[in-house]
Image (cartoon, grey):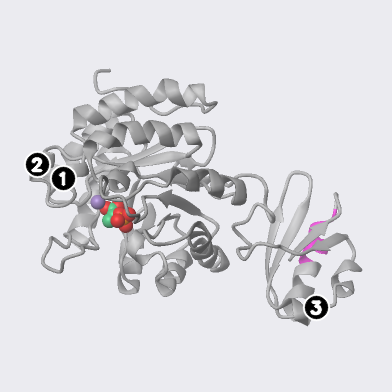
Amino acid sequence: MIVVMRPGATREEVLSVCRRLEELGFRTHPIYGQEKTVVGAIGDKRALSSEAIVNLPGVEKVVPILKPYKLVSRELKDTSTIVRVGEIPVGGRGIVVMAGPCAVESEEQLLSVARFVKAAGAHILRGGAFKPRTSPYAFQGLEEEGLKMLARARQETGLPFVTEVVDTRDVALVAEYADALQIGARNMQNFRLLQEAGATGKPILLKRGFAATVEEWLMAAEYILDAGNPNVILCERGIRTFEPATRFTLDLSAVAVVKENSHLPVIVDPSHGTGSWKYVLPLARAAVAVGADGLLIEVHPDPARALCDGPQSLHPETFDRLMGELTPLAVAVGRDWVTSGSMAG
Ligand code: PEP
Ligand code: MN
């Protein structure tokens, strides 16, 4: 439920509403807005007679939240959330591009991609050090060595980085190095992992499970916000359908649905979404047009030799072309920028 405070309610009044709600067994999430402050109250409504709250000083009204997800909902907060990864705002007017290899394979490989994507105008570096693989025999990642390489690439290029964490046992280690933690599709409903990762306070890039509905995805984000971390970026990365022409079916309608129902930023990953580098460009354009706040793109210096996801990885020159194409498109749909430059200049 939402407790809407009167315009001009004092901070003390807001805090005393929170205290009362907490005595009644609710968890409270005050949101201080420009015009109004609201308090999200999560708990069992049956414990509450609404007079107990409505009559407190500074309270205007109490309204129920109708959706099953509460804290991520626009019913509670209708201004869009901006999540900062390092210095980069995700969810504002700019289109943010996160790019890099599927997996960190060596220092040389990572540094060369990091330099390329930086020169082409990417804002955030990505790369997996802990890899969730379908086969136990496939390359599993360089683990802490990979994190150290990502940190060195950040030092050299100035790009903050996002990397996946696959197990609660690794959360503290990954959080020590990374600017943002990725929760992969296969772990979207690993609720303990969501809570532990959320508790670090780092921004969380939450990928949609490939068999998850939009509502289940938003409920997973709700776990992280409920753990006290409002910095969640959603990522549509394709779902399983009957269509085998692409690796997954990139569900761009989900972006429009999420934008309507949630204040969280949402980005699109056309690399995993299609599984083929050829389709990454057209789907990246479509993602920007539909209203995504950013893109996650896999780039490899030599895709044919990649240890992971080579067929969907862009060659650096193709990535540069993509960045060049996106800038005018972003402006056409009312966004500020995509890229700060090109490899040529
Ligand atoms: C990845 O980003 O490399 C990855 C494994 O993604 P997903 O969880 O979407 O499959
Ligand atoms: Mn990958």
Please tell me whether residue 345 is drawn above or below residue 31 in the rendered image: above
Quadrant in the rendering for residue 101: top left
Tell me, for residue 258, which label it has, or none.
Answer: none
- Please indicate, yes or no, whether residue 124 appears anywhere in the rendered image: no
Q: Residue at x 9, y 41 (%)?
A: 304
How many angstroms separate mark 2 from mark 1 (CA)?
A: 6 Å
How many angstroms separate mark 3 from mark 1 (CA)?
A: 56 Å
Q: Relative to 118, is 260 on the left or the right?
A: right
Q: Residue at x 35, y 45 (%)?
A: 269
Mark 3: which amino acid?
Leu
Cβ–Cβ under 8 Å for marks 2 and 1: yes
In the rendered image, residue 94 lying in the magenta stretch gets the answer no
Q: Looking at the image, is mark 3 or mark 1 nearer the viewer?
A: 1
Mark 1: which amino acid?
Gly
How many angstroms separate mark 3 from mark 2 (CA)?
A: 61 Å
User: Residue 110 at what x, y percent from top left?
Assistant: 18, 44
What is the magenta range? 9-15
Q: Relative to 161, is 134 on the left or the right?
A: left
**Which residue is labeled 2 in the image?**
304
**Which residue is labeled 1 in the image?**
310
Mark 2: which amino acid?
Ala
Quadrant in the rendering for residue 295: top left
